[in-house]
Image: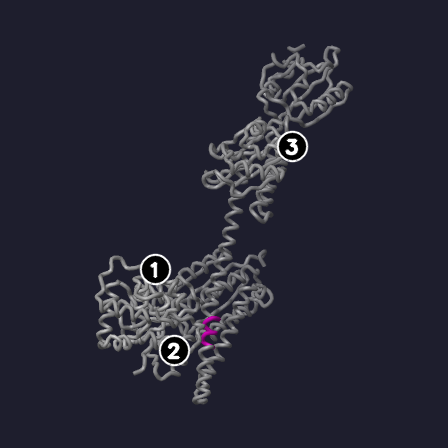
Amino acid sequence: MPIRILIADDHSVVRQGLRMFLGLDPELLVVGEAADGAEAVRLARDLGPDVVLMDLLMPVMDGIAATEAIRRELPDVEVMALTSVLEDASVISAVRAGAIGYMLKNTEADDLIRAIKAAAAGQVQLSPEAAARLMREVRAPQSPEALTERETEVLRLVAQGQANKQIARALRIGEKTVKTHVSSILAKLGVQSRTQAALFAVRLGLVSLDHLGGGA
Amino acid sequence: MTDRLAALFGAALDGIVVTDAARRCLYVNPAVCETVGCGPEHLVGRDILTLFPEPIRPIIEEAIEAAFSGQSRRLISPVLHTNGEERQIESTTCPLSLDGRALVTLFLRDESETQRLARKAHAMAQIVSSMSLAGSLEATLAALARTAAHATGGAACGVILMDEELQGARVTGTYGLSPQHVAGMRAAVRAGAPPPGRLAAQTRRPVVRLNACEEMLADPLYAPVHAAIREAGWEAVVSVPLRYWGRVIGVLNMFYPGGRKPGQSEVDFLTAIADQAAAAVENARLFVEARDKAALEERQRLARELHDSVSQALYGIALGARTAQAWLQRDPAKAAEPIGYVLSLAEAGLAEMRTLIFDLHPGALESEGLVAMLAKQVEAVRARHGLDARAFLPEEPDVSLGVKEALYRIVQEGLHNTIKHAKATRVDLRLSHTDDEVSVELDDDGGGFDSEGEFPGHLGLRSMRERAEHLGGFLEISSAPGEGTHIRVRIPISPDAT
């Protein structure tokens, strides 16, 4: 089954280009296009995509607010921020809002496809530099609920950049069970995304920064 | 004889002194007593020269001698008040023969109100013009210091803009103060010496210190500036606050050479200059601030435009070219669509760049004209956003460059709103002009908005309205949700503006 993608960008030329380009890969399917954040939230609800490619600067509702709304309402939908300027503040806001990762609009096109597939598999992808920068910004939750031993194990693997399927195999449990654990971890830590949970794992000392899932 | 002189001169408004060949005052009228501040009992019998400050006594002496040989003289000089102040007066000497005695009469006329006002007006005019000429705030303050010194007879002057707490100096401008003095004073203030003029700033009143320099020389806190003060040979310092709307923004310190004692009229004059200067300085500061803000806003707008157009177009081109490359290997027939897309983006990008380059070099409006530049804008909108954008343009209107630029910007802002917020498929631009006014209209078939309430794009509309109103014109909007938007800007053509 192809990965279902929703493109949210206020520039029609970018939407058109992305649709054409992603159409090259039979594993990817663009199911919808949104021209602003509010439309992105609406279409995510209607279409239930696997991944939303989210431009951050958009009229009506910006990409950060839209990311937050989507992650809150539809935790199974991963959001990948797609920005044309690497600006610390907006990248940090995007991750805090629940984006699983971010890509620059000048990134090699093939990397974009790789990143979308990783996001769909729930893999955290952050470069060590980006992670280090984010570590300073993403605050540890206040009085988090204690994780169970199993949840701690799952969190460690999430932080290593493993997909649900890989985690299931490693722990010899079902993929659905992994998903349940992940949702429970996010809820207990009070965070919106696996990326934030992964950063928290670093803070807990479960993994080192160097072992944080590499990639994007 | 005194009685007869009193009967003759007692009621005169001018001061009148009658002196004998030994220069002793035989008679003084009440106006003289008022000018110098003491009664006739202190004046009659005194050497007339003692009414004048030391340095100018030889000139007065010569004028009196000339009068004894029958020549009248007129000169303007300071006269001493018993409180040590000096007052500018006009003296006229003339011979007088009374009861066979050769005498000399001295008429002392206070510098008239009219003359004072004329001098003041002249200095004010100079201050105002120096404000607009000087580039930096420092240069402005230095020009002010120079004008004030010249207008009052001070030897040197420092104008200091202070911070909110009236402690440190933010900016200073000086005239006649040596670099050693300025550096020394700065060092002294850093080390804890009260900055000269602080008292004036704090009390918001002029402060006259007749022995200011002597006092500073006696105070070790001012050691770094001692050498400079001694060398310059100043004595008195008058400090007046610079007040703007009830707030003290700084102080003006005027330094006087030894033997020159500034009078009340001089202090009044300095106070008036200071108030005028405060307003001018504050205006200059606000102007610089506004200019910087406008430049910043313009840069931000350009950055936004670049983001919206060129960087997105380039990303699209990269994606399209990558797609075309992949199809050329797999199924060349399918490469046609992405290549067409790349071409259209490249064309739109070019149109876009032309508009942006215009923004960076507004000279294009002058060389190519408003009509051509508006046509380019509309072309860019058509190419970039796929809107059915049409331009209805007459021949080039005969209006000033300022009006053309305003119209160009208004259209730019209006088209931006249509693209961003209106969800329109069509937009028409109409330029028209009569003998009296020039107008532009923008008409789209988009979603419209409630022009009474909050709506996206209201900032753009405000800036459009401001531009129009700045030129005496106005902006009309008719729009309602679902009914498109019609905007009309009318700017009057004034005959002298073209």
- Residue located beneath label 2 in the image: A113
In terms of image quadrants, where is residue B165? top left
Instruction: Provide the chain ID for the residue under circle 2.
Output: A
> Main SS type for the magenta part?
helix
Is the residue B259 above or below the residue B465 in the image? above
Q: Nearer the viewer, mark 1 or mark 2?
A: 2
Q: Residue at x 55, y 66 (%)?
A: B358
- Residue located beneath label 3 in the image: B231
Name the residue at the right extreme.
B69
CA gap, disc 1 and disc 2? 44 Å
Would residue A113 be seen by someone viewing this image from the given angle?
yes
Rate crowding at label 2 as few (under 14), some (14 to 19) or many (20 or more) other CA atoms within 10 Å: some
Is the residue B331 above or below the residue A190 in the image? below
Which residues are drawn in magenta?
B310-317
- Residue located beneath label 1 in the image: B453
Would residue A60 be seen by someone viewing this image from the given angle?
no
For the C terminus of chain B, give its image quadrant: bottom right
Secondary structure state at the residue bearing disc 1: loop
